[in-house]
Amino acid sequence: MAGKGGGTPAQQRGGPDLVQGIELAPLSPPANLTAELVRRLAAEIRAGRLNPGDRLPTEQALMRQAGVSRTVVREAVSALRAEGLVTTRQGVGAFVADPAARGQMRIDPAEMQSLADVLQVIELRIAIETEAAGLAAERRDPAALARIETAADAFTQAVEVGETAVAQDLEFHRAVFAATGNSFFPRFLEFLGPMLIPRQTVRPALEDGAARTAYLSRVREEHAQIAAAIAASQPVQARAAMRRHLTASRDRYARMARAAKDQ
């Protein structure tokens, strides 16, 4: 229940870093920094050291404690939000979610032990998201279309400054799902959790930086094609564009899997 000053009692107790009961040791490469930060923060939440309503430490505090960049922190918070462990408030911060409000069925990142697992998730996405794009083209309203186009633009801007654009990628797919007008489609994202965008949890050293940059440039163009088909109310073209997009992702990870076997 909110106190007189606004916010939950837990939110009123602390300052900018709020939760003083945890201290994260710096993360070190070659671990996947985003996945490791997600794992550590999720462990604090599940162990009860961060309680519902508590505010996560600020971006600056997490960057300092874990020794990571702002991009890693933002990607980790986005993944925790996708898992239903935190909620975010623009301009305020991230807060631990009420367990009763968390999705009960999600793919746990711990289940994803190999690139073969990632390929299976992408196959699932192809089946669901292809139809979602078609429905979005049939049903989108001006607000839904604006959200899709804003997400596509945000992805482009993130890629242009050299970011991995995980949060922006996730928002684009959320926007397409929301445009279907079917509330069960967004709930499907809760099932996938952070695995919707596998590059935040799987970053094998099988592909150099230039290849990743080229891949993200292709994703930007594929997003633009999906958004254009939805804007033009062309469900057949929207389905085809989404299928091409996800099939290209599947093929990328299949190449990585083959390279891993050859090593």
Image (cartoon, grey):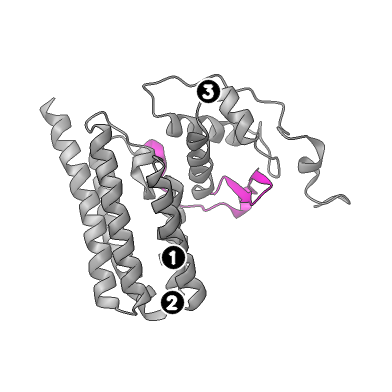
Within the image, what quadrant is residue 124 found in? bottom left
Seen at 44% across and 51% down, the residue is 168
Within the image, what quadrant is residue 185 found in? bottom left
Would you call the spot at circle 3 few (<14 residues within 10 Å), some (14-19), or many (20 or more)? some
x and y, in percent, of residue 60 in the image: 62, 31
- Mark 2 or 1, nearer chain start: 2
Would you call the spot at circle 2 few (<14 residues within 10 Å), some (14-19), or many (20 or more)? many
Q: Amino acid at mark 2?
A: Arg
Report which residue position mark 3 lands on.
67
Seen at 57% across and 28% down, the residue is 63
Q: Quick one: SS at disc 3?
A: loop
Report which residue position mark 1 lands on.
148
Q: Quick one: SS at disc 2?
A: loop
Residue 140 got which mark?
2
**Residue 205 on the magenta span:** no
Please give left or right for residue 1 compared with residue 78 in the image.
right
Q: Quick one: SS at disc 1?
A: helix
Seen at 43% across and 29% down, the residue is 33
Front-lying residue, 158 or 61: 158
How far separated are the C-alphas under marks 2 and 1?
10 Å
Magenta residues?
84-110
Q: Are marks 2 and 1 in contact (CB under 8 Å)?
A: yes
* Quadrant containing the C terminus in the rendered view: top left
Q: Amino acid at mark 3?
A: Gly
Let me know if residue 17 appears in the view.
Answer: yes
